[in-house]
Amino acid sequence: MSLRTHTLRLVLCAVLLAVALTAGSVALGDTGGPARREDPARWAAVAMAHVEQARTDGDPAHYPKAERALKRSLALAPGNDQAIAGRAALAAARHDFGSALADAERALKGNPYNERALCTRIDALVELGRYDEAARAAEVADERRPGVPVFTRFAYVRELRGDVRTARRVLEQALAGAATRGDVAYVATQLGRLAWEQGQYGLALRHFGRALAADGDYVPALEGRARAKAASGDRAAAVRELEALVARAPLPGPLVALGELHEARGDRARAREQYALVDAWAGLARAGGVGADLDIALAGADHGDRAAALRAARAEWSRRRTVHTADALAWALHVNGRDAEALPYARRATATGYRSAALLFHRGMIELATGHRAEARAWLAAAVELNPGFSLLGARTARAALETLEAAA
């Protein structure tokens, strides 16, 4: 295929991507309905419906609509806590966690029991890497507004500390108390993701199945099920499901997963097409006000422009210092040959006890590149033992490195 033909195909893919991202917003309609104009609470509810829809289908085109609705609500009732909490949630969805935290705190001054503000405060503190404060905020939220939204966040705070048992128990309690289809889909998906992270693929598939029984179009559950099938060895089914998913929700996670499946079976051309679409997604995400640097860093380090990945990782690290941003920066430095700089970030990424095979793998490879062979063996073995299917390509690299280390021992 010629360069010109390849370029035209990518342009066409980008156009189709734009169509897919805008089509989903039609369901909620524009925010200019006259029946809502004198009701600030309803405008705030419209905004949150857009944010929730974006979470469900991955469409950033919902965010400008949410922003307009929140502005209308605040114009009608300046300082109302529902709109300010909604603005915090919107900022968090756009990865502007500093603004999210400030607005969540502002809303809680007006109403200490605002559930959305309590939850967004936890989200923002977690994503800013302020884990001790996030744990305290989760306890406060649990005291004031116990329920599914708070329980899921409490569970994630525990998971970040490596307390998988408590995280699972809390999520199971949340699922037992879930009263709506949306809550069932969300909590069951979180349980599926947690099981997948621990290499429990059969359990993960059961949880994702329950999520999809509640909402058959729930994108995170569709992606999770496909990943679990790939890790279980059913790669053909995983490819079919991911192809169907990216056709309507071309997001970085499923695009990279599908690309790696193609690459693992030797189809590099189709793999490159999926990786290229991540850049198209990033442009549309930015147009919707979404910070995309973490996604760019993670995808680009393995499958794209490594220098751009490093710039994105540095930019994200400057804004928030979490285990995920530390890992992204460490890996971007590694693939750019700057392993001595990478090692402190890789060690920071694994310092909380968070059990993610991808993070363990990255640290192992960076330890190996800096000459720490015993440490490399331990971290790489831990990665493949925890979740041997965390990444088809990454797991393959980890096993090859372990074989080399064992042979030299």
Image (cartoon, rainbow, N blue to C red):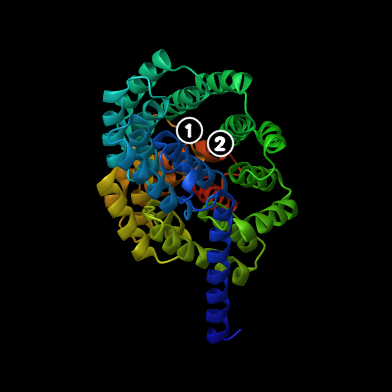
The mark total stands at: 2
Pointers 2 and 1 in contact (CB under 8 A)? yes
Q: Secondary structure at mark 1?
A: loop
Q: Is residue 340 above or below residue 42?
A: below
Q: Is residue 74 visible?
A: yes
Q: Is residue 321 visible?
A: no
Residue in the image at 57% along x and 21% along y: 174
Which kind of residue does numbered mark 1 sit on? Answer: Arg
Q: Which residue is mark 1?
A: 355
Residue density around tag 2, few if under 14, some if 14–19, many if 20 or more, within 10 Å: many
Q: Is residue 365 left or right of residue 148?
A: left
- In front of the other: 331 or 255: 255
Q: Which mark is residue 24?
A: none
Which kind of residue does numbered mark 2 sit on? Answer: Glu
- In front of the other: 379 or 387: 387
Q: Is residue 320 left or right of residue 260?
A: left
Q: Secondary structure at mark 2?
A: helix
Residue in the image at 42% along x and 36% along y: 39
Residue 183, image x, y percentages: 59, 30
Q: Quadrant of the N terminus?
A: bottom right
Residue 23, image x, y percentages: 58, 59
Residue 275, image x, y percentages: 52, 64
Q: Is residue 181 above or below residue 344?
A: above
Quadrant assignment, res 273? bottom right
Alpha carbons under labels 2 and 1: distance apart: 7 Å
Q: Is residue 78 above or below residue 312?
A: above
Q: Residue furthest top?
A: 143
Q: Which residue is mark 2?
A: 197
Q: Is residue 64 left or right of residue 151?
A: left
